Image (cartoon, helix red, strand yellow):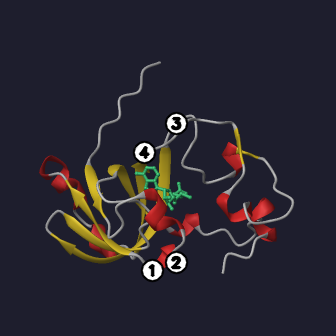
Amino acid sequence: MEVNIRPIGRVHSPYKSREEIKEIAKENIIGEIEIFSEFGKGLKDIEGFSHLWILWIFHLSKGSPLQVTPRTEKNLKKKKLRGVFATRSPNRPNPMALTLVELLEKKGNVLKVRGIDAIEGTPVVDIKPYVQSDKKDKARYGWCEEIDFK
Ligand SMILES: C[S@@+](CC[C@H](N)C(=O)[O-])C[C@H]1O[C@@H](n2cnc3c(N)ncnc32)[C@H](O)[C@@H]1O
């Protein structure tokens, strides 16, 4: 089966490299999602949503290991390998990423958003609204429940 995916836009981020973005409070980063003009009509009605899922490509992904030690655990004495599909690692078989952002403003084909964790120039492949059914009251968080993200 062949899957054809093409970028619909790109990220404008204050961060230019993977390393630069590593250590910071990601949920507060303000950036822009520029949607290419040919896809602009698809943004109709988007202002009604406070939050959006941005689907993007880890275009600077390095390799595709099936098990990784998450960055959040690297400082722990007992490092653990986790299955890549139980992590948000940028290095994975298909370099797909998703980020939930808050929509602050729409200016033409540009969405100003809060919560960007992608670097400048990252290709965006889709946008979907955050809807009521995305909220799960009984969620469990696996190994992340042991991590202090502060
Ligand atoms: C842990 S990943 C999580 C990304 C997304 N929220 C997800 O869950 O799929 C975020 C990290 O990816 C790295 N990153 C950002 N943009 C990237 C890109 N275009 N290519 C490769 N790595 C990138 C940065 O180091 C950033 O801190």
> How crowded is the residue under tag 1: few (<14 C-alpha within 10 Å), some, or many (20+)?
some
Q: Which mark is residue 60?
A: 4
Secondary structure beneath label 4: loop
Residue 14 is marked as none
Residue type, numbered disc 2: Ala
Q: CA distance from mark 4 to mark 2?
A: 21 Å
Q: Position of residue 85 (x, y in %)?
A: 67, 45
Tell me the SS state at disc 3: loop
Q: Residue at x 35, y 35 (%)?
A: 5
Residue 55 against residue 32 in the figure, above or below: above
Answer whether labels 2 and 3 touch (C-beta < 8 Å): no
User: Residue 143 sits in which quadrant?
Assistant: bottom right
Is label 2 in a helix, a strand or a loop?
A: loop
User: Which of the 4 image quadrants contains residue 147?
Assistant: bottom right
Is residue 106 found left or right of 128 in the rendered image?
left
Foreground: disc 4 or disc 1:
4
The CA distance from mark 4 to mark 1 is 22 Å
Residue under label 2, please give it. 25
